[in-house]
Amino acid sequence: MTAYLGQAFVYLVAAVIMVPLAKRFGLGSVLGYLVAGVVIGPLTGLVGAETETLQHVAEFGVVIMLFLVGLELQPQMLWQMRSKLIGLGGMQVAGSALLISGTALLFSVDWRMAVAIGLIFALSSTAIVLQSHGEKGWSHTEGGRSSFSVLLFQDIAVIPILAFLPFLAMPEPDVVADLVHGGAEMAGTAGEHHADDSLADLPPMIYGLAVIGAISIVIIVGQFLSTPLFRFVAKSGLREVFTATALALVVGISALMSMVGLSPALGTFLAGVVLANSEFRHELESNIEPFKGLLLGLFFITVGAGISFTVLVDNLGFLIGVTVAVIFAKALVLYLLSIVFKVRGSDRWILTLSLAQAGEFGFVLLAFSLQINVLTAEMVELLAMVVALSMFLTPLLFILLEKVLMPKMEKATNEQQEEDVIDEKGQVIIAGVGRFGQIVNRLLLANGVSTTVLDHEAQRVDLLRQICIKSYFGDATRLELLHTAGIDEASLLVVAIDDRERAIHLVQEVKRNYPNLTVLARAFDRGDEYQLEHAGADIVVKETYHSALYMGGEALKALGYHPFQAENLKQAFNQVELENHPELRADWISTKHEKGISASYKELFIKLDGALVQAMKKDRSDTHSHEERGWTPPPAGYDDLLEAQQADDTDGTARSGQ
């Protein structure tokens, strides 16, 4: 018992230290787990023989992951993916297997071994790819969806590959039958894709009916029995029982699929799809998610711990060469297929580099190939190392993609595209139409105010055009473009571009050349607000200030404060901020050359917090003004007054332009 606890402690401490470190340096959690495994395994020897056994247990994390993926997919969505699932996925497996097998034949590898190696390396790592795509927010991109289609097909392809591999061992027909039967048993010992002994002995027709029956059970249970069951359990009010029920569902389906020789991962994926419309979908996700994360993390650690430094050092050149060759061959096939299936831009590279590694099913297939004498023990040891190394290198490929390729592609796309010809000039020019600028634009358009929208990101402009928002591609920091957009006649300029430095530069240039133009600017934080004001912006709004203030008011109301009292406290908070703003800004501007925050600014900020506390304690029930409520109606005839004022402004602009 003490030994087990000690080993568990080592695994947990390694993950707790390495994963946050990897995330801090922007390397992703997968690489953190892999490095943690290397540290406690081959580097220090803290763990050893139990690694392989743990790996089989941890592979259940992949099963849970596919169940959660299924919960996100409705059957209609799965049907829409059919062309890429079968076409892109099928061609990737076939193309990669052919290219890798052909390369092996060139090095005089026996053709049976070459075919087996090609099929094994054609599969990619579902665990690494889906985990990394989820962390980086690529799951809903075109590249992420295409990658998922390929991975799903690969998971299906494992079954026919397991059935086909025995034919590569013995060509004689009488022996083939024995091998097929023996193969099923050996696959069973691998723990992932196997048939129970009793079912393996059944006649083919009855066995087929058993498979159909198992799938039908999954669909019937998911569609008709799961909701009453979960309702019954939920009424108990015991969260741990609900979690146990969810786990029992996943484990039961896995056992059923294994019994009939199907992939447990595919079975749970099917169950997830069936439950995608269930009222308990989100509850299931929240209960299962922690087990997925822990088991996948354990799986990655065992991969790292399983790397043998002795084998690696003795065969360093061979292993590096084969690993690079496998990654290159798969990337080449995926890149060509991305052209055929019209996956463009950064999505093409997401698909190409995400799936270029070998996968966790490779370990299972290698062990199976050894047991049926398709591959030798020495070859399996080396090829398993190639699988581990390719998985180890995948996070580095993601870093290359995220830090180097994608920024360059985005920059190149923007530079290659010519600026649009502006054919309409609006009353208001909006520079930057991201999440902030879009809301400003929609509010103005909804009130009949004409706008001219400029943005430097071509993809964003294309997206806006797809939803019928007229916008122009171009660099709004260029005064020539602003002149073309009609800044001489515009009433306002709204600066909402995402680059802080370019936004400040734009405000400075505009106020220098058009000092009478009103400039409104979006600030990211307090320091950005000071700089934009210092640059000459007339009105500066911190992008999160008012939404945070609104949420603070809602929090007070949720805590039992009267709505009027909460509104009063918000107004008091805002008033104190405004009163102290000039002093804080002046100090910040005078000391901005200092590294970090100056001592005088800290003192002023502490003083501000003290003033806030005092303002909150003040009873404002009898002293507030109507204006503080924020909903004082306009005086009678205000619309006519506003219309007359706008007419005067238009006449004045026309006269100044003459």
Image (tube, rainbow, N blue to C red):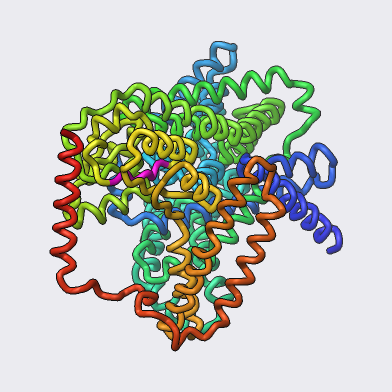
Q: Position of residue 598 (x, y in %)?
A: 69, 50
Q: Magenta stretch?
A: 492-497
Q: Was residue 80 drawn as part of the magenta stretch in this picture?
A: no
Q: Is residue 328 visible?
A: yes
Residue 156 visible in the picture? no
Q: Main secondary structure of the magenta part?
A: strand
Residue at left offset 61%, top offset 24%: 323
Q: Where is residue 106 shown, x and y percent of the image?
A: 55, 11
Residue at figure coordinates x 40%, y 62% from the top left: 218
Residue 430 position within the rendered picture, expressed as x and y whole percent measured from the top left: 30, 43
User: In this rendering, is residue 331 above or below 138?
Assistant: above
Horizontal side of residue 166 vs 311, given as left or right:
left
Position of the C terminus, as image quadrant, is: top left
- Percent from the top left, x then y, of residue 153? 41, 40
Residue in the image at 40% along x and 41% along y: 497
Q: Is residue 14 above or below residue 424?
A: below
Residue placed at 65% from the left, 48% from the top? 299
Q: Looking at the image, which is closer to me, 245 or 16? A: 16
69 vs 343: above or below = below
Q: Nearer the viewer, residue 190 or 201?
A: 190
Say which quarter of the image contains residue 186: top right
Q: Nearer the viewer, residue 624 or 343?
A: 624
Q: Quadrant of the N terminus?
A: bottom right
137 left or right of 26? left
